[in-house]
């Protein structure tokens, strides 16, 4: 199922899992996990810091729409708050931490005030959202990150492990996938090129991940590569796979679309229809996961 949202106004080895708070009365492990994969075309891509607030506003609308469709997990693409505009992170003022008196920065921090609308919508809807951003940690270490915003409004960053090209000049790599507990489902997070390395998904599997969630940018001509990566990672480790692809035009070329979900047999079970902004919904079933892991579904 895909939903095209209305136009939004522009106003290591895997780490131990962290349990995101869930609504009172829920069991320790849900039989299903309803997930929204958001293929997202960044607003004002190429304008750096100016784009952050516009994209935050658009993300809020999309989280609300996904929640209305029953989503408990909402996955956005790589660098979804700016678009894949690496030059913005090295320009004048780009390395500065946002301050009330200084120019706005395309870099974010864990406690960045610009994230407040997203923290509020996740707390209000009890949803976990995964947002793509360039992050400067408290010690100013530059990271290419996914920011996991929990249903209590907390922010937890996870970092891209396998940097490539110009990314290596801008960011410090992470040390492997990290696991977050969402309704009893163990979700491992990856950023783009991480999915190209079998060892990254292997570390997630060793940490007993149920879902391998990838925030990415795959461009035109990489359709086969995208499908092979996600199908292989899901099938090899008997996990569900999710991939949110950055949509539209990017400095690396036009998106190839194909955001979606893959089953533990490696087959695609949900796909975005086009290459622009869409929400692809999927229901992940624990019984199907266990069937393949036991060999019954092989």
Image: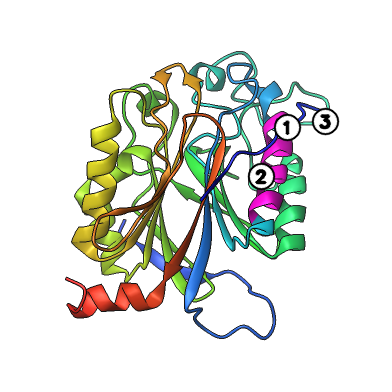
Identify whether 285 is placed above or below 234: below
Which quarter of the picture shows residue 8? top right
Q: Earlier in the sequence, mark 2 or mark 1?
A: 1
Q: Position of residue 139 (x, y in %)?
A: 56, 43
Question: Which label number is shown at residue 147?
Answer: none
- Marks 1 and 3 sit apart, C-alpha to C-alpha, by 26 Å
| Dots 1, 3 in contact, CB < 8 A | no
Circle 3 packing at 10 Å, graded few (<14), some (14-19), many (20+), is few
Q: Position of residue 16 (x, y in %)?
A: 41, 69
Residue 33 visible from this viewpoint: yes
Q: Nearer the viewer, residue 152 or 240?
A: 240
- In the image, the segment drawn in magenta is 53-66
Element carrying mark 1: loop
Element carrying mark 2: helix
Question: Which label number is shown at residue 100?
Answer: 3
| Secondary structure mostly seen in the magenta stretch | helix
In this picture the colour scheme is rainbow
- Marks 2 and 1 sit apart, C-alpha to C-alpha, by 9 Å
| Dots 2, 1 in contact, CB < 8 A | yes
């Amino acid at each position: 199922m895909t939903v095209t949202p209305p136009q939004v106004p522009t106003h290591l080895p895997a780490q131990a899992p962290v349990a995101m708070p869930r609504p009172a009365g829920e069991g320790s492990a849900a039989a299903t996990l309803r997930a929204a994969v958001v293929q997202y075309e960044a607003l004002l891509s190429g304008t750096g810091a100016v784009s952050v607030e516009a994209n935050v506003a658009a993300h809020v609308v999309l989280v609300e729409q996904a929640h209305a469709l029953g989503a408990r997990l909402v996955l956005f693409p790589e660098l979804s708050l700016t678009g894949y505009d690496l030059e913005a992170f090295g320009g004048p003022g780009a390395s500065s931490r946002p301050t009330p008196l200084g120019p706005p920065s395309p870099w974010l921090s864990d406690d960045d005030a610009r994230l407040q609308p997203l923290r509020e919508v996740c707390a209000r809807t009890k949803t976990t959202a995964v947002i793509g951003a360039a992050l400067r940690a408290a010690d100013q270490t530059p990271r290419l990150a996914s920011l996991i915003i929990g249903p209590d409004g907390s922010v937890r960053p996870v970092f891209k492990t396998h940097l490539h090209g110009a990314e290596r000049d801008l960011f410090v790599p992470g040390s492997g996938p990290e696991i977050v507990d969402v309704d009893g489902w163990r979700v491992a997070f990856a950023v783009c090129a991480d999915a190209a390395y079998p060892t990254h998904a292997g570390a997630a599997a060793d940490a007993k991940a149920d879902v391998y969630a990838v925030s990415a940018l795959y461009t035109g001509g990489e359709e086969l590569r995208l499908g092979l990566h996600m199908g292989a990672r899901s099938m090899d480790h008997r996990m569900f796979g999710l991939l949110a692809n950055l949509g539209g035009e990017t400095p690396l070329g036009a998106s190839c679309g194909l955001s979606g979900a893959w089953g533990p047999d490696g087959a695609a079970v949900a796909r975005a229809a086009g290459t622009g902004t869409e929400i692809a919904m999927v229901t992940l079933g624990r019984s199907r996961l266990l069937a393949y892991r036991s060999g019954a579904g092989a």
